[in-house]
Image (tube, grey):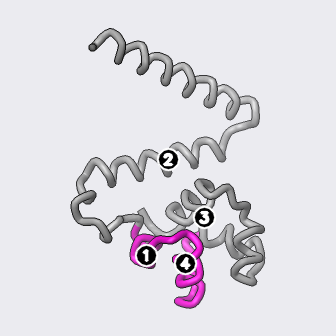
Amino acid sequence: MNFGPTLKMLRKQQKYRQKDLADYLHVSRPTIAGYETKNKQPDYEKLEQLSNLFNVTIDYLITGINRTFPSLQDTRDTHYNLQLTQLVNYFDSVSDKSRDDLIRYAELLLLRDKDDEKHNK
C-alpha cells in the first residue's frame, strides 16, 4: 500500500471530504485528488499535519503499515488493511444504487455470521 490509498482510507473512515482536507492543508481539492489517485506526494509539513489530524505516524501514512505496535504486525493485519482499502475503492467506483446494494449485502452477511455463531455454540 502506498500513500494515496492510505490517505483515502483514513479520510473515508473519518468521513472527511476531499475539500475538507484541502481546506485543512490550505491546498486545492484537486491536489488532494492527486494525492489519492495520481501518486502525488505532499511535502513533509503537510505529512506532519495529516499525521496529527488522523493520529497516525508519518510512516503509516506513507506505507500503510502500522509499525507502532509490533505485536499487531502480522500478515493478517496487512491483508485486512488491503481488503479495507479495496472495499472503499469499490464503494467509491459504483453507482449510488450499487452502493445501497453493497450495504444491504453487508447486512445480510452480518446476519449470516450471527446465525453461524448460534449454530456453532
* Residue 43 placement: quadrant: bottom right
Residue 16: give x, y in percent of width and height: 69, 61
Q: Secondary structure at mark 2?
A: helix
Magenta residue span: 38-63
Kind of residue at disc 2: Gln
Residue for badge 3: 37
Give the mark toward the camera: 2 or 1: 1
Instruction: Give the distance between the C-alpha atoms of the residues marked 1 and 4, in whole angstroms.
Output: 8 Å
Q: Secondary structure at mark 4?
A: helix
Q: Secondary structure at mark 1?
A: loop
Residue for badge 1: 57
Kind of residue at disc 4: Asn
**On residue 52, which mark appears?**
4
Kind of residue at disc 1: Thr
Q: Earlier in the sequence, mark 2 or mark 3?
A: 3
Q: Are marks 4 and 3 in contact (CB under 8 Å)?
A: no
Q: In the rendered image, which quarter contains the N terminus?
A: bottom left
Q: Earlier in the sequence, mark 4 or mark 3?
A: 3
Residue 48: give x, y in percent of width and height: 53, 84
Q: In the rendered image, which quarter contains the C terminus?
A: top left
How busy is the neighbourhood of tag 1: few (under 14 within 10 Å), some, or many (20 plus)? some
Instruction: Give the distance between the C-alpha atoms of the residues marked 2 and 1, in whole angstroms.
Output: 22 Å
Q: Are marks 2 and 3 in contact (CB under 8 Å)?
A: no
Please state if 54 lies on the left or on the right of 81 as rendered.
Answer: right
Of 98 and 10, nearer the camera is: 10
Instruction: Give the distance between the C-alpha atoms of the residues marked 4 and 3, in whole angstroms.
Output: 22 Å
Please state if 7 lies on the left or on the right of 118 as rendered.
Answer: right
Instruction: Give the distance between the C-alpha atoms of the residues marked 1 and 3, in whole angstroms.
Output: 21 Å
How busy is the neighbourhood of tag 3: few (under 14 within 10 Å), some, or many (20 plus)? some
Residue for badge 2: 86
Q: Residue at the spot x=55%, y=80% of the render? A: 41
Establish if 121 lies above or below 65: above
